[in-house]
Image: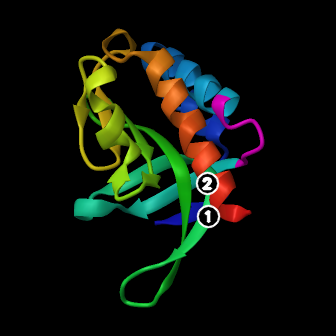
């Protein structure tokens, strides 16, 4: 995956009206929770080998186990074929925040750092916003 010049607003506008409404609400929620973070589009092959377009919020870099430095996003948002996905790429202690918050998020499917849901009503947006703010605090603390 790599950053591209496409704007997040253009990505959101490219969807059907019902999908656009949900993406816009989530986009606003994430930007509110991460007020000092930039957002940009990422495109390319994602985990599992699928082609993806993701809005990434907050940029950071880390060194993988193979010693390669990687640029990545703190929070990601995308529309999959049948659901929405939010990625929270933050760890507290040895656990991803999604693992810590998963029981409070509502009717969602979670992975290590991913939250997927079919409808906005399925996710507890207050908890989602709280988790994103938590991710921001952890990242800010690690930068100091």
Q: Residue at x 68, y 53 (%)?
A: 140
Q: Earlier in the sequence, mark 1 or mark 2?
A: 1
Could you tell whether 72 is left or right of 100 in the image?
A: right
Q: Give the magenta range.
A: 33-38
Q: Secondary structure at mark 1?
A: strand
Per the image, the residue denoted by label 1 is 60
Residue displayed at 27% across by 58% down: 50
Residue 59 x/y as whole percent: 64, 59
Residue tagged by mark 2?
139
Q: Main secondary structure of the magenta part?
A: loop
Q: Nearer the viewer, residue 15 or 112?
A: 112
The residue at the point 45 percent across, 45 percent down is: 88
How did the renderer colour the structure? Answer: rainbow
Considering every residue shown, the one lying at the far front of the view is: 93
Give the mark toward the camera: 1 or 2.
2
Do we see residue 16 in this rendering? no
* Location of residue 133 in the rendering, given as x and y in whole percent from the top left corner: 60, 34
Q: Which of these two is toward me, 99 or 1?
A: 99
Q: Nearer the viewer, residue 101 or 11?
A: 101
Observer-nearest of 39 and 45: 39
Instruction: Check disc 2 and report its element: helix, strand or loop.
Output: helix
Specify few, some or many for label 2: CA neighbours under 10 Å numbering under 14, 14-19, or 20 or more.
some
Horizontal arrangement in the rendering, residue 52 relative to residue 47 (left or right)? right
Displayed quadrant of residue 61: bottom right
Residue 99, given in percent of the width and then of the height, sits at: 29, 42
**Structural crowding at the residue carrying mark 1, measured as other residues with C-alpha within 10 Å and reported as few (<14), some (14–19) or many (≥20):** few
Q: Is residue 32 left or right of residue 54?
A: right
């Amino acid at each position: 995956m790599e950053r591209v010049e496409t704007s997040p607003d253009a990505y959101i506008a490219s969807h059907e009206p019902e999908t656009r409404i949900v993406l816009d609400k989530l986009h606003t929620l994430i930007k509110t929770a991460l007020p000092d973070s930039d957002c940009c589009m990422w495109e390319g092959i994602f985990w599992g080998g699928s082609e993806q377009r993701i809005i990434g919020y907050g940029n950071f870099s880390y060194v993988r186990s193979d010693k390669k430095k990687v640029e990545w996003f703190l929070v990601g948002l995308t529309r999959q074929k049948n659901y929405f996905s939010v990625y929270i790429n933050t760890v507290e202690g040895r656990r991803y925040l999604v693992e810590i918050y998963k029981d409070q998020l509502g009717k969602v499917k979670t992975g290590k750092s991913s939250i997927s849901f079919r409808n906005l009503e399925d996710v507890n947006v207050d908890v989602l916003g709280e988790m994103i703010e938590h991710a921001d605090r952890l990242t800010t603390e690690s930068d100091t």
